[in-house]
């Protein structure tokens, strides 16, 4: 007990106050007389080695004394106070109240305070889980199923529908294997229903995306019939959508209504969408009254633009004028829920606020607002154009009513666009005077509308070939909006027809600077360079245009024509071959291919394309001429007869075709038929010298009596011909103005008489590509004569033979198979007879509509 230190009584802050109050039972003075205690000391428990403490404490420094119950209890002090801890070597009593925070007062001297135990080093590695247990296998399999579902959804998002379906099927197989494994391990109660639902739902979606509608419906049925899936009835909407795609409208209505019954009123937005689908199905079924019921309910509960437009369509279908007006008024009153555009205009010089406005000006939210507004404007414009002719006695009055309604709504800027559409409607009705008057009303409007109206007026006057007025309104459109590419194109076109190509090119270039995607300006610029002889720059323009318009037949033809002018026939043939893939039945393209192959000396390929051209358009004289000459050259005169007979039908006043028919009969040895043909020609053309010569020769060889009559007629005709030639020569010599006139014939007995050239090369206007394209003429060059690889096929027209020629003397005249530029939006066939174009013809091929509006 000598190590026990008592706290002095005079200290006020005694931490151990009250510890001297103890039960006398715990007094240790009589322990020597306690038999039980002494017996316990003598046992093996009492003979334990004594406790050696490093620090002296307030209790006994030796081993604790066991009680009769075998438990170790510290021995009380000599004064009878129970011990509260083993204090050694004068150390303070340990503070156990803060041990939970990691603090302990009974620590070794020199140690550092480390409540988190960081000085002990890293924690030992975790033991590896045993993957062979059934529960671990189930968890791994569930993770694989979830990964497959995710991969399937990602593949569908990337457009790989086949891969997404395969992943969905694999997920279904693994999920079924997972269910079987749980049943085998006796944990069927823990089946993950959410995972099963996800697998089936994804599989049904992938089936529907791959147009496997039967499989998709079967999968949806599995989900819907399983009562363990919550809210599975909503999937009947998806089933109804599939029936709608299959055009099974009755079942689609049924399933939409079943889904509607299973959706509570709390999900009003979903119910509205389903009812909208029901109305659309009724429209497809032609039940407009039922569709109107659905749409009217939606417009009363939650109006939207699409439903209002559909409602107008239904009223239009049943012809209800008054309800059309009311529906249009409801449509323009539908709130869009977007902010005002003024929000994006900087209001002050605050740089921070301006930066924020610039950041949100083109963000996704603003883009969505613009798209929503553009869609609403599109529906309103379409509705107005639809109902305007139906709601009033005339479409003009109907347009005026729609304009008045729009002016009083939030779409006031659409009123001017409706007025322009009114003018376009006049154009469609060929009422050009009213269209011009309507457009002239916009001369005092704001700059945007004035520019659009002036552009359309310039277009109209250009079509009427009133180039001064077209130029005036093009200037007005440019002054109202200098950045209007359509106005610049119109101005360039008016300069183009005046053959000021350099200035026209500048206007086209400016239009391209304002709108780099303006294909009309690029096309016209290429034509301008072509006129200027800058073929490489023209080729560059059309190559750029081809990159934008991959299937434009006009662009491909221009490229082929440029390569031909650059003396690169192989590239020209290549582009024409591409052109035939776009317009395989265009006779002019096929004829041009035949001409190029003929120039290259490839007669077989030339014959193939000329024959195809003739098959699609058997009235092209140049093609007929070439085919007839080809058969004559290959000694198949009988086959040539049918082509020259068709040429005779097309041009009955041209004697040369009938002479060619008679010549083919002579070459084939059918002299009797040849004689009859020449006689028929003589009756139609009694002054034709060549016909008379052949008649004299044939009658002489055949020993006919008519030979003397034909010889007499021949001499008279030749004498008259000489007299005419003498008069012509004298007239030339005496003419003061030196006018040059072509003689009626060559005066030589070995050349054709009264036989015009086989074909004159005719050039037509450039292809009208834009609504206001040029009307100038493109004198494309034709490659005539002999090529480097072979001579062109020639036609031999027979004359009266000389003394050393028994039946025929020939002169060669080459076939001109030049190709004309395509006219209008599609490739046009050449007309067989010229006629005066009427006003209707000038507008026959024009596309009047939205194309009239500026970009």
Image (tube, rainbow, N blue to C red):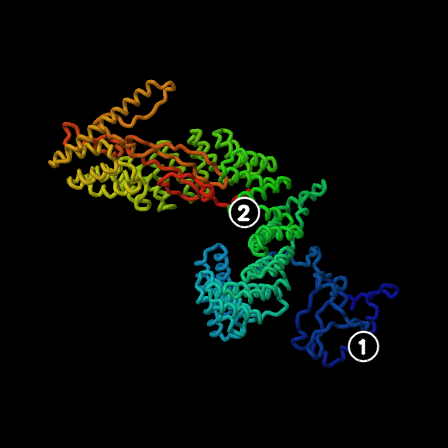
Q: Which residue lies furthest to the right in this view?
A: 10
Report x, y in % for residue 160. 45, 56
Numbered disc 2: secondary structure: helix
Closer to us: mark 2 or mark 1?
A: 2
Q: Quadrant of residue 833?
A: top left
Q: Is residue 818 visible?
A: yes
Q: In percent of the image, x 29 and y 32: which residue is there?
A: 756
Q: In which quarter of the image is residue 555?
A: top left
Report x, y in % for residue 117. 65, 58
Label at residue 142: none
Q: In percent of the image, x 67 and y 43: which residue is there?
A: 355
Q: Is residue 802 above or below residue 335?
A: above
Q: Can residue 512 be seen in this view?
A: no
Q: Nearer the viewer, residue 353 or 87?
A: 353
Q: Which of 164 and 447 is in front in this view?
A: 447
Mark 1 burial class by Cα count in 10 Å: few <14, some 14-19, many 20+: few
- Asked if the residue at tag 1 contacts the one at tag 2, i.e. Cβ–Cβ closer than 8 Å, the answer is no
Q: Mark 1 points at which residue?
A: 23
Q: Is residue 712 above or below residue 827?
A: above
Q: Nearer the viewer, residue 788 or 134?
A: 788
Mark 2 burial class by Cα count in 10 Å: few <14, some 14-19, many 20+: some
Quadrant of the rendering where the N terminus is positioned: bottom right
Tell me which numbered mark, 2 or 1, is placed earlier along the sequence. Answer: 1
Q: Residue furthest bottom?
A: 35
How far separated are the C-alphas under marks 2 and 1? 120 Å
Report x, y in % for residue 838. 45, 41
Quadrant of the rendering where the C terminus is positioned: top right
Label at residue 426: 2
Q: Residue furthest left?
A: 703
């Amino acid at each position: 007990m000598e190590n026990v230190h008592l706290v002095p009584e005079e200290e006020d802050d005694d931490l151990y106050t009250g510890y001297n109050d103890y039960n006398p039972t715990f007094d240790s003075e009589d322990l020597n007389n306690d038999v039980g205690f002494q017996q316990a000391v003598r046992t093996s428990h009492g003979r334990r080695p004594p406790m050696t403490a490093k620090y002296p404490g307030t209790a006994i420094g030796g081993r604790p004394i066991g009680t009769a119950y075998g438990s170790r209890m510290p021995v009380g002090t000599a004064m009878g106070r129970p011990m509260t801890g083993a204090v050694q070597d004068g150390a303070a009593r340990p503070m156990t109240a803060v041990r939970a925070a990691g603090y302990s007062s009974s620590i070794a001297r020199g140690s550092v305070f480390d409540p988190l135990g960081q000085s002990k080093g890293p924690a030992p590695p975790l033991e590896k889980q045993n993957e062979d247990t059934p529960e671990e296998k189930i968890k791994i399999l569930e993770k694989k199923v979830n990964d497959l579902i995710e991969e399937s959804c990602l593949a569908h998002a990337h457009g790989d529908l086949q891969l997404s379906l395969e992943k969905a099927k694999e997920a279904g197989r693994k999920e079924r294997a997972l269910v079987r494994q749980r049943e085998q391990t006796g944990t069927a109660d823990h089946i993950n229903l959410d995972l099963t639902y996800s697998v089936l739902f994804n599989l049904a979606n992938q089936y529907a995306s791959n147009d496997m509608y039967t499989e998709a419906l079967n999968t949806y049925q599995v989900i819907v019939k399983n009562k363990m899936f919550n809210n599975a009835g909503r999937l009947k909407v998806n089933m109804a959508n599939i029936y709608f795609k299959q055009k099974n409208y009755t079942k689609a209505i049924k399933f939409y209504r079943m889904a509607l019954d299973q959706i509570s009123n709390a999900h009003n937005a979903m119910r509205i969408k389903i009812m909208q689908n029901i109305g659309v199905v009724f429209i497809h079924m032609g039940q407009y009254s039922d569709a109107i019921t659905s749409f009217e309910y939606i417009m009363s509960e939650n109006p939207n633009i699409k439903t209002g437009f559909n409602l107008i369509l239904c009223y239009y279908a049943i012809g209800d004028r008054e309800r059309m007006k009311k529906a249009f008024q409801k449509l323009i009153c539908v709130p869009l829920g977007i902010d005002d555009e003024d929000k994006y205009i900087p209001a002050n010089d605050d740089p921070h606020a301006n930066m924020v406005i610039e950041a949100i000006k083109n963000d996704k939210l603003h883009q969505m607002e613009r798209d929503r507004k553009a869609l609403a404007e599109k529906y309103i414009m379409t509705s107005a154009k639809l109902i305007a002719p139906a709601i009033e006695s005339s479409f003009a009055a109907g347009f005026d009513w729609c304009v008045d309604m729009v002016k009083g709504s939030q779409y006031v800027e659409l009123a001017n666009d409706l007025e322009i559409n009114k003018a376009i409607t006049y154009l469609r009705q060929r009422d050009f005077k009213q269209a011009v008057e309507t457009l002239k009303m916009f001369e005092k409007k704001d700059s945007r509308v004035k520019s659009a109206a002036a552009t359309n007026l310039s277009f109209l006057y250009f079509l009427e070939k009133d180039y001064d007025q077209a130029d005036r309104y093009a200037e007005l459109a440019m002054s109202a909006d200098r950045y209007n590419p359509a106005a610049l194109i119109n101005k360039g076109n008016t300069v183009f027809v005046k053959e000021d190509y350099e200035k026209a090119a500048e206007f086209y270039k400016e239009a391209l600077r304002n709108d780099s995607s303006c294909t009309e300006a690029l096309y016209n610029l290429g034509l301008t360079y072509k006129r200027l002889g800058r073929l490489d720059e023209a080729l560059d323009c059309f190559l750029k245009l081809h990159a934008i318009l991959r299937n434009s037949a006009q662009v491909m033809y221009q490229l082929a024509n440029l390569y031909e002018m650059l003396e690169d026939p192989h590239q020209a043939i290549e582009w024409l071959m591409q052109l035939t893939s776009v317009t395989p039945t265009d006779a002019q393209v096929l004829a041009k291919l035949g001409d190029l192959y003929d120039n290259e000396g490839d007669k077989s390929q030339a014959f193939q394309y000329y024959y195809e051209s003739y098959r699609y358009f058997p009235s092209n004289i140049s093609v007929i001429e070439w085919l007839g000459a080809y058969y004559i050259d290959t000694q198949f005169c009988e086959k040539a007869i049918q082509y020259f007979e068709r040429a005779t039908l097309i041009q009955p006043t041209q004697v040369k075709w009938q002479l060619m028919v008679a010549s083919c009969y002579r070459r084939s040895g059918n002299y009797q038929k040849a004689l009859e043909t020449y006689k028929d020609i003589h009756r139609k053309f009694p002054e034709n010298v060549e016909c008379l010569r052949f008649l004299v020769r044939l009658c002489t060889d055949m020993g006919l009596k008519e030979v003397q009559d034909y010889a007499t007629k021949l001499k008279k005709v030749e004498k008259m011909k000489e007299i005419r030639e003498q008069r012509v020569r004298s007239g030339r010599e005496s003419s003061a103005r030196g006018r040059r006139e072509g003689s009626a014939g060559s005066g030589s007995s070995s050349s054709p008489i009264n036989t015009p050239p086989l074909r004159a090369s005719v050039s037509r206007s450039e292809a009208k590509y834009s609504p206001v394209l040029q009307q100038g003429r493109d004198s494309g060059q034709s490659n005539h004569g002999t090529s480097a690889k072979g001579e062109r096929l020639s036609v031999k027209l027979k004359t009266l033979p000389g003394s050393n020629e028994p039946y025929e003397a020939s002169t060669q005249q080459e076939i001109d198979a030049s190709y004309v530029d395509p006219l209008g939006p599609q490739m046009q066939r050449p007309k067989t007879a010229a006629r005066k174009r009427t006003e209707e013809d000038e507008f026959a091929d024009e596309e009047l509509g939205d194309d009239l509006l500026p970009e």
